[in-house]
Image (tube, rainbow, N blue to C red):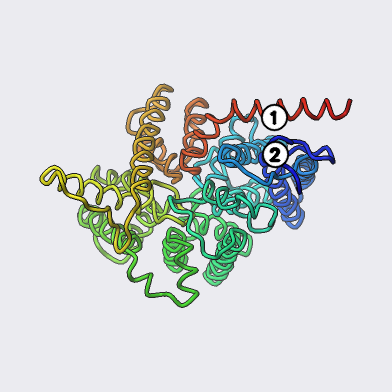
């Protein structure tokens, strides 16, 4: 690496300086390891698909090691390369996962495999697998693993375990990690990512224990813990959490889903003894308030049909937390509720939970920022000379942050509009199309209308692909994908230049 510069894209060893190839390779290695573990799980069960899963895992590992072997990370990592690395890593993982689904016979169509893979890695939880029960354990475990890896982010894992990205790594972490903030917990980005993953793994183990105590088998507990902490929502049963019929498990899931929708950096500060910050967090208070007020409103509106007993409270709270945390577990059919509660759920799908969590959606902190910005602009209309910062709680948002939030808001709404029109073009009714677009960009899974269960089996393939693209935009928070696409011509020109230099060096 010493002496490498932008004018010397190829090292003396012949390795290409490319953060894109290097990170894609590392992501494929991680995905390959997950497939190998899934094959082992299948062997411990029936071994019906173990060889196919293992072959896919070995293939992913081989491609990953090849990419890693021929590339090296530059000393300087520009922004366009960061966004390209993030976008192409997700695309690569989606494709190898889709191959696994097709090779194992889980789906006959590659498009269905792509949809299931995108839904998994983006932690959306929508599915085209029908029926779920009876599918090989190895495939079900891989399906849950995609959400577990996607929850905190494969790129964050790469930064955590490989110090090679110490230079420019925060840009990569910020590009992939959910939320509008790239706050450091420790001085070095690698240790920041390690702390986040340590908390993530700790929560996963705690949820596994809670589910096992509640009567789940170890296999079901691990799968559901993976998809709870990641706010993904994939289940090993067709009727999701309703399959268990356990009050204890439902309450355990409510607590776990709510916790997964809260900020992981906040948990780190609490563990470091700064719990006072938790009680002063306006975002945390708002997140809790949305859940409690939303539950109360729905109970009041539905009081005639479902009553207000313990069962109704538990089922309503479960549904509200499942939607607001963007987990998407199913317990009851909320599409049978009145229009007002369904509309409220639609708003929650779009809003999501806290920044710095594994949840999708617009994020509560952005909503607060927009509300404070609107208040300031209203005051400025009355007092044109007013100079007043945008405050959220005790914090002041810099103008560049406010501008970025407003820009993201416009793109967020624009994406929903385009996705709604595109999905509706495939003979999907307006309510279903709109809610599918909102659910996809919010990475929720269930929608309204025909998609209340989150199962897209009866939807046209074109609508599925439109929803899948929207899921990816939502999970990567739009900016990385759009900037990677915009930077592709420049990145391709640089790649061609590197190839010319390599050919000249060989001569």
User: Circle 2 sits in a helix, a strand or a loop, which is it?
Assistant: loop
In the displayed structure image, the side of residue 437 where residue 83 appears, left or right: right
- Cβ atoms under marks 1 and 2 closer than 8 Å: yes
Residue 130 visible to the viewer: no
Residue 235, image x, y percentages: 54, 52
Q: Which residue is mark 1?
A: 495
Q: Specify the quadrant of the image occupied by residue 115.
A: top right
Residue 361 position in % (x across, y down): 40, 47
- Nearer to the camera, 471 or 100: 471
> Can you say whether 96 is above or below 396 in the image?
above
Report crowding for label 1: few under 14, some 14 to 19, many 20 or more residues within 10 A (C-alpha): some
**Residue occupying the point 69% across, 29% down:** 495
> At 62% across and 43% down in the image, what residue appears?
77
Tell me if I can see residue 133 in this picture. yes
Which residue: 38% across, 40% down?
408
> In this image, 486 relative to 421: left or right?
right
Secondary structure, mark 1, is helix
Q: Which residue is mark 2?
A: 18
Would you call the spot at circle 2 few (<14 residues within 10 Å), some (14-19), or many (20 or more)? Answer: many
- Sequence-first disc among 1 and 2: 2
Q: Residue furthest right?
A: 507
């Amino acid at each position: 690496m010493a002496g490498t510069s932008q004018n010397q894209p190829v090292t003396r060893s012949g390795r290409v300086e490319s953060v894109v190839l290097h990170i894609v390779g590392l992501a494929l290695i991680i995905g390959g390891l997950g497939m190998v573990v899934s094959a082992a799980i299948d062997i411990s069960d029936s071994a019906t698909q173990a060889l196919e899963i293992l072959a896919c895992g070995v293939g992913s590992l081989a491609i990953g090691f090849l990419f890693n072997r021929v590339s090296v990370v530059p000393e300087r990592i520009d922004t366009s390369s960061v966004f390209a690395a993030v976008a192409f890593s997700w695309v690569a993982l989606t494709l190898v996962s889709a191959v696994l689904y097709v090779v194992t016979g889980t789906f006959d169509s590659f498009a269905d495999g792509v949809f299931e893979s995108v839904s998994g890695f983006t932690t959306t939880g929508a599915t085209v697998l029908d029926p779920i029960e009876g599918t090989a354990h190895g495939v079900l475990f891989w399906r849950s693993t995609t959400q577990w890896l996607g929850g905190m982010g494969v790129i964050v894992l790469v930064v955590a375990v490989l110090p090679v990205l110490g230079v420019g790594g925060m840009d990569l972490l910020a590009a992939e990690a959910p939320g509008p903030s790239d706050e450091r917990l420790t001085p070095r980005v690698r240790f920041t990512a390690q702390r986040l993953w340590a908390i993530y793994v700790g929560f996963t183990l705690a949820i596994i224990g809670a589910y096992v105590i509640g009567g789940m088998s170890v296999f079901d507990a691990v799968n559901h813990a993976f998809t709870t902490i990641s706010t993904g929502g994939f289940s090993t049963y067709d009727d999701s959490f309703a399959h268990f019929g356990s009050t204890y498990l439902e309450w355990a899931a409510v607590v776990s889903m709510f916790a997964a929708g809260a900020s992981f950096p906040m948990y780190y500060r609490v563990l470091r003894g700064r719990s006072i910050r938790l009680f002063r967090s306006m975002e945390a208070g708002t997140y809790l308030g949305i859940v409690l007020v939303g539950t109360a409103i729905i109970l009041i509106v539905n009081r005639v049909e479902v009553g207000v007993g313990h069962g109704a409270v538990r089922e309503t709270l479960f549904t509200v937390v499942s939607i607001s945390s963007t987990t998407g577990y199913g317990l009851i059919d909320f599409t049978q509720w009145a229009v007002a509660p369904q509309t409220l759920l639609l708003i929650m799908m779009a809003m999501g939970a806290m920044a710095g969590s594994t949840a999708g959606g617009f994020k509560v902190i952005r909503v607060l920022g927009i509300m404070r910005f609107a208040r300031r602009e209203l005051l400025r209309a009355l007092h044109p000379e007013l100079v007043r910062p945008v405050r959220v709680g005790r914090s002041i948002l810099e103008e560049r942050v406010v501008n970025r939030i407003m820009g993201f808001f416009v793109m967020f709404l624009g994406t929903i509009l385009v996705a709604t029109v595109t999905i509706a073009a495939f003979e999907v009714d307006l309510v279903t199309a709109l809610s599918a677009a909102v659910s996809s960009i919010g990475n929720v899974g269930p929608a309204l209308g025909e998609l209340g269960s989150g199962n897209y089996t009866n939807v046209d393939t074109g609508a599925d692909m439109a929803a899948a693209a929207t899921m990816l935009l939502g999970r990567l928070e739009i900016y990385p994908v759009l900037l990677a696409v915009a930077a592709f011509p420049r990145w391709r020109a640089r790649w061609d230049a590197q190839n010319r230099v390599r050919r000249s060096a060989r001569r």
